[in-house]
Image (cartoon, rainbow, N blue to C red):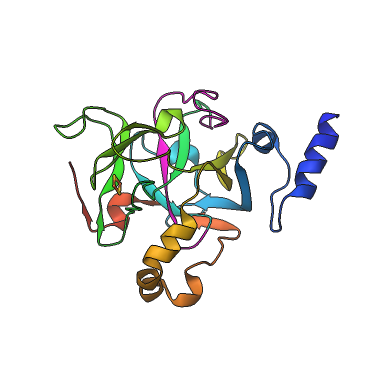
Amino acid sequence: MQRREFLAALAASCASPCIAPGEALAAIPAGSGRRLYARALLTDDRGKPLRAAALARERNYLFHYPYATTPCFLLDLGRTAAAGSSGAWPGGVGPNRSLVAYSAICSHQLTYPTRDISFISYRAEASPQNRHARVIHCCSEHSQYDPAQGARVLAGPAPHPLAAILLEHDPKNDTLHAFGTLGVEMFDSFFEKFGFRLALENGAQNVRKPVADEARVIELDNFCRQQVRC
Ligand code: FES
């Protein structure tokens, strides 16, 4: 099959709304466990297109995708996250391939960042409870994920990696789009477990509302009143 036919087949096979085929999508083989969602431009806290260069290295950023209530981490790891280091995960994007995004819902028992408190975040430094540096660490039961390797599990009871959020970087404008997920999604379990709380906080009509054209990125420090360190 010619490349053009391959991309056309991909475009025809995904549910609406869907992304235009592109290099980022073509890099992830069909059958890899990818799921395509709306192609959403990542914006800053003023609603302007987020420039990748504006992201601070190793700082926790949060956005919601593919639903209005499902949080994700956006990280500039400050180092290359190579493709192929973990299954079909395509690696980081951006000029240095250092930009990655993952669902912020722990695969163990669904701990996630709320506006009140977060037990899970990226930690650059090791600690007494966290012998690995540069990991996403869930303080609930100390699951640790390597964001440079598709969020594979390094420690703790997590049964599988965090779901990766598929990103596309536009080198011309230095902007980012999210367009899908890869890996085991926890969204149905998340809605089942926290649906009541999410409805109180966001309105029942917004709990499973799909993100459409854009997703606003905010520093975790500005989203969450208290972060638990461990
Ligand atoms: S919920 Fe994250 S380690 Fe248990």
Residue toward you, 125 or 94: 125
Coordinates of residue 6 in the picture (x, y in percent): 80, 35
Residue at image x 64%, y 34%?
28
192 on left or right of 220: right
Name the magenta segment's main secondary structure.
loop
Coordinates of residue 223 in the picture (x, y in percent): 32, 57
Q: Is residue 82 magenta?
A: yes
Image-quadrant location for residue 34: top right
179 on left or right of 59: right
Coordinates of residue 228 in the picture (x, y in percent): 19, 49
Residue at image x 43%, y 76%?
203
Magenta segment boundaries in residue numbering: 67-94
Quadrant of the rendering where the C terminus is positioned: top left
Asked whether residue 46 is in view, the answer is no
Quadrant of the rendering where the N terminus is positioned: top right
**On screen, 135 above or below 162?**
above
Coordinates of residue 161 in the picture (x, y in percent): 43, 38
